[in-house]
Amino acid sequence: MPRKITDACLSCGSCVDSCPAGAIFEGDSHYEIDASACLDCGACEDGCPNGAIVAE
Ligand code: SF4
Ligand code: SF4
C-alpha cells in the first residue's frame, strides 16, 4: 500500500526531496502523496518532524 500524509502535516516541505519518485506535492490543506506514483519505499517517513506520513 502507498504511504499517506495525514492532517498532522505541518506543510514544512522537507519530505518532498526525500521521495525518489517525486510523488509528494503540496495539496490544498497540507502536503499529499500521489498514490499512483508512490513506490512504498518508506524513505519519506523518518524525515517527517510530526509523524504525519503513515502506511495506509
Ligand atoms: S515532512 Fe511531514 S510535516 Fe513536513 S510536509 Fe512532509 S508530511 Fe508534512
Ligand atoms: S514511500 Fe517512498 S515513493 Fe512513497 S511517497 Fe514516500 S518516499 Fe515517495
Image: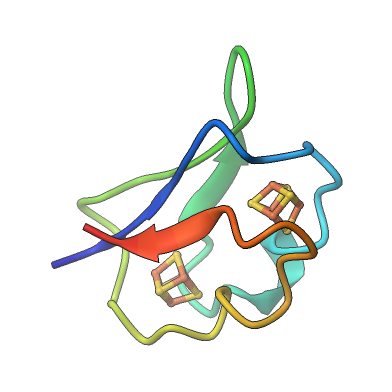
Quadrant of the rendering where the C terminus is positioned: bottom left
Rendered position, 46 above or below 6: below
- Please indicate whether residue 16 sits to the left or right of residue 33 in the image: right
In the visual, does 14 lie left or right of 8?
Answer: right
From this viewpoint, which residue is outermost toward the left? Answer: 1
Residue located farthest toward the top when viewing the structure as drawn: 28
Q: Where's the N terminus, which quadrant?
A: bottom left
Residue 55 occupies which quadrant of the picture?
bottom left
Q: Position of residue 18 (x, y in %)?
A: 67, 77
Kindly identify the residue that appears in the image at 47 percent across and 40 percent down. Answer: 6
Where 45 sits versus 22, above or below?
A: below
Which residue occupies 58% across, 23% down?
A: 27
| x, y percent for residue 29 | 62, 15
| Colouring chosen for the image of the structure | rainbow
Q: Measured from the top left, where is residue 9 in percent x and y?
A: 66, 40
Locate ligand 2 by image quadrant.
bottom left
Answer with left or right where residue 10 lies relative to residue 18: right
- Pick whichever, 22 or 49, lies toward us: 49
Residue 17's spot in the image, x, y percent?
Answer: 74, 69
Query: Considering only vertical position in the picture, is 32 above or below 19?
Result: above
For the point 54% across and 31% down, the residue is 7
Q: Give above or below for 29 relative to 48.
A: above
Picture mark count: 0
Which image quadrant is residue 2 in?
Answer: bottom left
